[in-house]
């Protein structure tokens, strides 16, 4: 199954000159734990960084910096790992594990942001599949009882 089938398509984004306060407000408004930082190149949003709720706490609040002055470009994770929307979900899981990240921006072939895959998305998919397998065991038993009383 390609990542495009389960990634979240509504990604909240900011640009590098937006403030840490802007990021915090968007996270609260949308009930999310991260915001993708993008640069607009020829009308296409290209992911260049990520800000998480943890970044805001550890980098800004804990050090008592002014959230209205510090920009997301100042504190965003510069090493951003992305995946193509055509990548297989199990390859994406292995990639997340190798890179030790919980969130992966999903990009098109031209590098434009199309979604985000989070650990929560993966866990929801896997738990649903495990539940379906567990149900299969029960159905198989009921089927056998009907056919071999």
Image: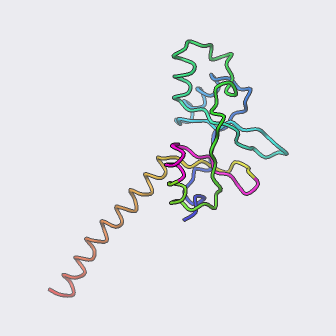
Query: Which residue: 40% across, 59% down?
Result: 128
Question: Which quadrant is the C terminus positioned in?
Answer: bottom left
User: Would you identify the image quadrant in which residue 144 lies?
Assistant: bottom left
Residue furthest toward the right?
A: 42
Residue furthest toward the front?
A: 98
- Percent position (x, y) of residue 15? 73, 32
User: Would you identify the image quadrant in which residue 40 lies?
Assistant: top right
Decide: is 9 above or below 148.
Answer: above
Decide: is 102 above or below 142.
Answer: above
Query: Which residue: 58% across, 26% down?
Result: 24
Is residue 18 located in the magenta-colored stretch of the structure? no
Query: Which residue: 54% across, 59% down?
Result: 91
- Percent position (x, y) of residue 46? 74, 44
As drawn, is 46 to the left or to the right of 56?
Answer: right
**Which residues are the magenta region?**
95-110
Is residue 98 located in the magenta-colored stretch of the structure? yes
Query: Which residue: 68% across, 24% down?
Result: 74
Residue furthest toward the bottom?
A: 148
- Percent position (x, y) of residue 130? 36, 61
As drawn, is 44 to the left or to the right of 98?
Answer: right
Q: Nearer the viewer, residue 54 or 77?
A: 77
- Percent position (x, y) of residue 50? 62, 36
């Amino acid at each position: 199954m390609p990542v495009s089938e389960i990634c979240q398509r509504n990604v909240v984004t900011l640009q590098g000159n937006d403030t840490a306060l802007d990021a915090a407000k968007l996270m609260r408004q949308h009930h999310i734990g991260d915001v993708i930082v993008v640069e607009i190149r020829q009308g296409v949003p290209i992911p260049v960084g990520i800000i998480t709720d943890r970044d805001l706490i550890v980098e800004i609040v804990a050090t008592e910096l002014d959230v209205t002055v510090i920009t997301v470009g100042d504190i965003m994770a510069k090493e951003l790992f992305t995946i193509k929307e055509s990548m297989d979900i199990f390859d994406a899981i292995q990639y997340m594990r190798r890179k030790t990240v919980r969130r992966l921006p999903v990009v098109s072939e031209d590098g434009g942001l199309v979604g985000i895959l989070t650990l929560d998305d993966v866990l929801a998919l896997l738990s649903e599949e495990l539940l379906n397998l567990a149900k299969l065991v029960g159905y198989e038993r009921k089927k056998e009882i009907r056919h071999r009383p």
